[in-house]
Every structure is written in structure tokens, then in C-alpha cells.
Image (cartoon, helix red, strand yellow):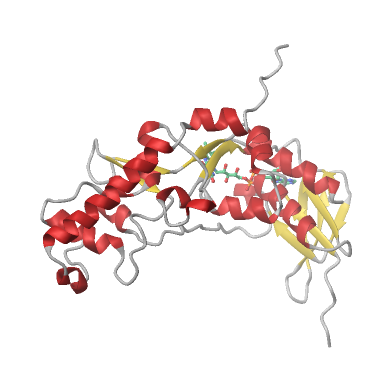
Amino acid sequence: MRPEPVREIVIVGGGTAGWMTAAALAQVLGPGQRIRLVESEEIGTIGVGEATIPNIRHFNAALEIDEDEFIRATQGTFKLGIQFCDWGRVGDAYIHGFGNVGPDLGLVPFHHYWLKMRALGRAPGLEAFQINTAAPEQAKFQRPDPALRGSPLGDVGYAFHFDAGLYARFLRQRAESRGVQRVEGRIVRVHQRERDGFVESVLLANGETVAGQLFVDCSGLRGLLIEREDFELFGASSWLQVMTGQYLMPRGWHPLVDQRSDDEVAALVAHCAQVVANCLQRMPTQQDFIERHCRAPKPEMA
Ligand SMILES: Cc1cc2nc3c(=O)[nH]c(=O)nc-3n(C[C@H](O)[C@H](O)[C@H](O)COP(=O)(O)OP(=O)(O)OC[C@H]3O[C@@H](n4cnc5c(N)ncnc54)[C@H](O)[C@@H]3O)c2cc1C
């Protein structure tokens, strides 16, 4: 027997999670489903400043969101990495940049060459080899340039800081324009189906019942329906920068590195740092980039 197709979807909660879910489902599902979102103004949302990781760009891209419009609407800025303070020792800090460290050298990843030269005292810190860790020092930013594939400027990983409340509002407009219905009300009871425990409806304080076949819990810390927290992972290709930031230094490097003379490897590593430094020269400051592409209008004075 074929399972009954899901036609009635109910999202519980209208913070960032709720409106992200609503906008995404409205975008990818056809017109055959009714999507409703229940939220309570009385309870409100967290809606603080949101610091994100690069996966958010995949999400926005899937929703065909114009990035400049998004930055303006959420009063956002660009973010190249995360700075960790006092992790290795008090007073120390390192940046986990959202991109690759060093160029793609084929069989043996760059960091093996760096490890050997570092052990010999012939290489600077890892931050010199990644545009994402070098650029924040000079408050510089640009998006990756696809025409510069293979250059550090073709490989700028980034995410955003933005106002979570404004992001939810921005996505709400998109979701509602694609047919999502917002239901205002405080949920006071969750009804589960007796035979298998599936949620089948929620009861609002005003006595209204909202029924559905699929419920998505976006009620924040309350976890009205699920009572468990999600987790997220950094999509880093090498954890070396995190390890060195915490003073965990791998002792070895790939044996193929030893096939080249130390001077040859030192020249290669120095060249890689020089390429990053040259790219940095060409990069605009974040301020200039925002002015040129996505400056938000000045707030109107009352
Ligand atoms: C100070 C601070 C800093 C943070 N910084 C970051 C950060 O940098 N990066 C990051 O990713 N995260 C950060 N977070 C966490 C992040 O902001 C929150 O996890 C996120 O905003 C929560 O969004 P949400 O949609 O899950 O929940 P909420 O914003 O809490 O929304 C919950 C929704 O559920 C509804 N709801 C709840 N109960 C009911 C009910 N009984 N009936 C009807 N509706 C109900 C509410 O009305 C609301 O619409 C931070 C949080 C705080 C507090």
C-alpha cells in the first residue's frame, strides 16, 4: 500500500528556524501542499545578531535569494572566519578561516610542506597561507572571483553576521508570497496519534485546533514537539588550523615531502605565502565592498 502523500504541513514557531523552514518548503514543494506556520507574538523570538557559517550561503542560494538584497535587508556584514580567544593559552587567539589553507598541490596537501618547514623554523604561521585569515587583519573582503580559479582570490570562503529578527522578516515575506499561511496563537497542547505517537494537531489558547500530517518543530529552546537539540559541523577540509590554534602540533608530515630538498620546499612555501600577500593587496576593504555592492539605506529619523 502506498503511503498517503503529505498535503498538510505545520511549522511550529516563527523565529529564524521557522521562517527558514517555511521559505525553503514553499520554494521546493509544488502547489499541492498547504503550509501553515504557527507563532505567538506573546512569546516572541530570540532574534539577536546571528553569526553564521558558510552553509548559510547554500541555503540562500537554494532559495534564489539575491545576496546584496539579503545583506541590505538584514543589516548584514561579511565574515571570513571565527576568532577563538584564550583557547591555546590565556591572551592568545587564532582565526579559524572559512577556506582552504595553502594551494591545492595535488597528491600531498600543502600543510605537509608547511609542517616540515615550520619544524625547521623556516615558515611563518598558518595565517600567512590563507586569504581568510590574512584579510581580517586588514579588514579586507571580496567575494571569490570565479575567473581566478586556483588563486586565493578564487577561493574566499565566507558567511555573514546579520540581524536574526530581520532575516526572519525577510524570509517571511518570501514564504507568504509563495502561499505560506501564518497562524497567530499560543500552543497550549500537542495531540499525538494514539497508535504510533505521531503529532496530529496542536491546540491554541483561543481554542482553535491546527491539524497536519507533518509537523516541524521550530519552537526554539522550548522544543515543544521534539525536546532535543540539533548540532552543526564546520565543513573544514583540514583541522590543522584548529589544532595549531590549540597548541596541538602534528609531529610528522607525508614522506613524499622529504623527496624534495629543504631549500626547494622552503621556496615553495614562501611562494605560497607571497601569493596570499599579493592577493591581499588587490582586495578591497570590507567597508568599500559593502559601499559598492550592498549598502543599506540610512535609517529614517523619527
Ligand atoms: C545572546 C545570543 C546570541 C546568539 N548568537 C548566535 C550566533 O551568533 N549564531 C547562531 O547561529 N545562533 C546564535 N544564537 C542562537 C540563535 O539566535 C537562536 O538559536 C535562534 O535565533 C533561535 O531561533 P529559533 O527560530 O530556533 O527560535 P526562537 O527565535 O526562540 O523562535 C521560537 C518561535 O517559537 C514560537 N513558540 C514557542 N513556543 C510557542 C508556543 N507555545 N506557541 C506558539 N508559538 C511558540 C515563538 O513565538 C517563536 O516564534 C544566539 C542566541 C542568543 C540568546
The answer to which of 152 and 233 lies nearer the viewer is: 152
Q: Quadrant of residue 49?
A: top right
Q: Is residue 45 visible?
A: no
Determine the residue located farthest toward the bottom in the rendered image.
1
Residue 123, percent from left and from top: 18, 50
The answer to which of 27 and 12 lies nearer the viewer is: 27
Q: Quadrant of ligand 1?
A: top right
Left or right: 114, with 241 as reference point: left
The answer to which of 33 and 62 lies nearer the viewer is: 62
Residue 255, percent from left and from top: 18, 73
Q: Quadrant of the N terminus?
A: bottom right
Q: How many marks?
A: 0
The answer to which of 18 and 62 lies nearer the viewer is: 62
Q: Quadrant of the C terminus?
A: top right
Q: Quadrant of residue 170?
A: top right
Residue beneath the point at 56% across and 31% down:
290
Residue 243, percent from left and from top: 28, 55
Residue beneath the point at 71% across and 59% down:
216
Q: Determine whether 112 is above or below 54 in the image.
A: below
Left or right: 290, with 18 as reference point: left
Residue 134, percent from left and from top: 35, 41
Residue beneath the point at 50% across and 46% down:
158
Q: Is residue 227 visible?
A: yes
Q: Determine whether 236 is above or below 186 in the image.
A: below
